[in-house]
Image: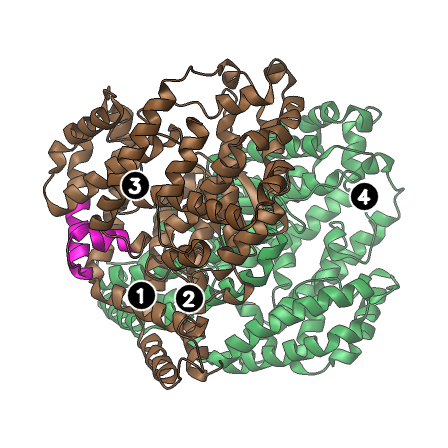
Chain colours: A green, B brown
Amino acid sequence: MNHESLTALGERVAAVNDVLNAISCLTWDSRTMMPPGGAETRGRQIATLTGLARDLLLAPETEAALEAAERALESLSPEALAPDAPERRIVAQTRQAFAYHRRIPGHLVTERAALRTVAQAAWIDARARSDFPAFAPYLEKTVALARSYANAVGFTDHPYDAMVAVYEPGETAASLRRLFAGLRIGLRYILDQARARPAPRADFLVRDCAEAEQRVFGLAIAEAMGYDFARGRLDTTVHPFEVSFTRNDVRITTRYNRRYLPASIFGTAHETGHGLYEQGVDPAYTRTTLATDLVGLYAVGGTSFGAHESQSRLFENHVARSPTFWAVHFPGLQKAFPDALSDVTADEFYRAVTRVEPGFIRVEADELTYDFHIMLRVEIECALMDGSLSVSDLPEAWNAVLRRDLDLVVPDDAHGVLQDVHWSSGTIGSFASYTIGNVMAAQVMDALRGEDPSLDASLAAGAYAPLADKLRERIWQHGRRFSREELLVRTTGRGLDPEPYLAYLHGKYVG
Amino acid sequence: MNHESLTALGERVAAVNDVLNAISCLTWDSRTMMPPGGAETRGRQIATLTGLARDLLLAPETEAALEAAERALESLSPEALAPDAPERRIVAQTRQAFAYHRRIPGHLVTERAALRTVAQAAWIDARARSDFPAFAPYLEKTVALARSYANAVGFTDHPYDAMVAVYEPGETAASLRRLFAGLRIGLRYILDQARARPAPRADFLVRDCAEAEQRVFGLAIAEAMGYDFARGRLDTTVHPFEVSFTRNDVRITTRYNRRYLPASIFGTAHETGHGLYEQGVDPAYTRTTLATDLVGLYAVGGTSFGAHESQSRLFENHVARSPTFWAVHFPGLQKAFPDALSDVTADEFYRAVTRVEPGFIRVEADELTYDFHIMLRVEIECALMDGSLSVSDLPEAWNAVLRRDLDLVVPDDAHGVLQDVHWSSGTIGSFASYTIGNVMAAQVMDALRGEDPSLDASLAAGAYAPLADKLRERIWQHGRRFSREELLVRTTGRGLDPEPYLAYLHGKYVG
């Protein structure tokens, strides 16, 4: 429908989207291109633009346009305009974000931005010296601020609920506890069986592989998966990420380790999955609420962090970390690195990149142990938020869970509680999305396989377009119009369900 | 001095500076990194941020802080706070910009931004087909809008005065006419004598030189000149430029032509001069009015476009296009390109890169003919602004002046009136700064040589720090605190004076 109130609201949101995309560009630049000297003022530039985006959203003009649009939609019957029509979703989501930000006092926003700057510096320093007590005061302030946020935003059962809702709308401390209870048992069962099998050969993974050739191979697999370089780039960074400045400019990054080839390959595949999601959003949604996270103040087309992660994990683990993928691509890899791979078969390579080995570091974890690292963090975030765990007791709690779940004795805090950047940047509530992404990826793949038995034959032939077409139709094109749970119901017939994920892992690692 | 009103005003201006630096980052990215798909929304992002910067400047909070700061400064005697103290300049310049933008109706700003988008596309198309009539309607609108701007801003004598003031405060149609009258005669006199001399050998300039080695050489000369890569980058672009996101992140670009080595060398030297100016601004001025062009809404530390150009031309022409520079650097160049330069001497190289040959294209012009291209454009801009020349008569007028000044017959409009991007982007009034830069560069060099006879010995030894130290002390560090004319008086004892420029050219090209 066309209505002048929707146009007026659309112009306000488009301006917010422009500002948020500018922030994304400043952030991408700071992590890929910026000379060291630029760091001093870049944080201020991002803080100023974030404040302006919030001001634009909360301006009286936005509220007036929102109210007029709500009145216009109320007068329309569900027959005239469906309840899930883009217009209705735009108005409802903008209203929700407006209400969210109005509940948060400005001083909390300012304090959070100020704390982030000093806390990150303190964390970098503390991690380098493995000195948790040096970081503890900042984490205490971060937790206190998060609790103030939760109180301002409001929650029914648990203060964590207000935090996780920003990243994974619909999830709560209670819903995650239920999800994780089943996952923990199932994963442990599979892990124990997998570890009873003999370890594969993996000596060749640490042989020298030149960065330039790694990059060429990464570009080739991203392109094979359908990533469009006329609307994207692949750059080098320390901590790989994907970011979009609208569907037509979606950038991915990776890192190259000369002595560990899998890092760039699976990192690139992972970020390609994120990138495909963003590149696949309906062009009509550009600069609208349906391509803007107005709650999180982030220009993104994906509907939740977990839904986004489902697409990256799907391409990383279901596509690239599969025997058929290496049957197709190993000859090319071997040709690119003859010195490192001449005595290796495709099957040996696949077995090496799917070997299971519990470790301390989340970002290096294999598929069977990764979720334990996530569940640990969510458990601890919940306990910090409700006060049942104090910051000073955190290392002990962390180490106890890792021993309980993975039989590991953490040697020092740098390999434990200090390893992640998230808390130092003021982020609490985002970790659950990683595991939700894993669960969703398997559930979606299971459903797509069920409805199209030829899908595996295409993948085995190295043809990824049939898969991408289905994902575009079911997930990517919808941007933020549907929630993650709605996408799952539309694609798989039911909400989030860990069963296909456990079945996939069992088949892959136990057989 | 410290005063809460100055602090409040400073915070407002700092936010404007943050937004303008974000725009600079978006612009840099669009010209160096952005994939083709990104163009669609990048223009909107920049337009939104420009509007926000203007809104921040014109907000009631800024005006209130400005008025309070003015009252605080009025109460101080010149003995307590000098008339040219940074605080007084900050307040006066912010007031001037506030008044400037308030005089311009919002609809003119919107129309200008909208016209720019379509006019640039039309210009690119018209230039490719050398079809001036296809571009004429857009240029007519651009001129009409510029006249509306001039009327809104106000002027005493000539509507052009309101346009040139944005780029070169203090200059007017009348002041430029006086400057150009003398220059035209002097330049023509030198040009005629120079052309009477035998042309040097230049065959080797079009020999193949690999881009990678050109880049290495460019990086080396930028570094030798004092450009700090911890606070900068050198990237590749189509039309080279320099841009800063504060003094600690100053980026230069160049282009590489395998078949014309001088393009990258002198392009890099030129942009290095711009970059040194920005990197040399007093750190205390970061995010203040003294490092922000609040009239032009551009984050820049240089005090006028002409002052900026003086530093780029100084490093391009006085430093790099000199016999002593090549006495030092030619052996390195020869080593980098043995195939292209083995049969060439340093002196032959210098003579080749200073050969004189009138041509149609401004950006390819030599030192002796460049200013004729500028004077032509300023003459035409003045006539378009006061209505004495209509757009339809423009090609004829252009071609007549080029025949009069350089004895050239323009073959088509692509080599004539359609060659520059400026008018298609809505820019009228900026051309004069290029010639002012040339004049200022020679005047400054003449003064510095006069006060330090050892300067030439340092340059001849390849030591550029003594020159850079002087320029930093006299010009760079002051940012926008002093006007271009004030800098000239402080450095050379008098205002802009073409005599040293003509003397320099005569010595270099006639001897």
Q: Amino acid at mark 4?
A: Arg
Between A291 and B322, the one lying in front of the other is: B322
Tag 2, which secondary structure?
helix
Badge 3 and badge 2 both on one subunit: yes
Q: Are marks 1 and 2 in contact (CB under 8 Å)?
A: yes
How far apart are labels 3 and 2 at the CA level? 26 Å
Write down the residue under mark 1. Answer: B97
Badge 4 and badge 3 both on one subunit: no
Does residue A286 appear in this view?
no
Residue ID at (12%, 32%): B393
Write down the residue under mark 3. Answer: B422
- Which numbered marker is on residue A355? 4
Q: Amino acid at mark 2?
A: Thr
- Which numbered marker is on residue B289? 2
Mark 2 against mark 4, which lies toward the viewer?
Answer: 2
Magenta residue check for A332: no
Q: Amino acid at mark 1?
A: Ala
Tell me if mark 3 has few (under 14), some (14-19) or many (20+) residues whose alpha carbon lies within 10 angstroms of its own. some
Between A183 and A484, the one lying in front of the other is: A484
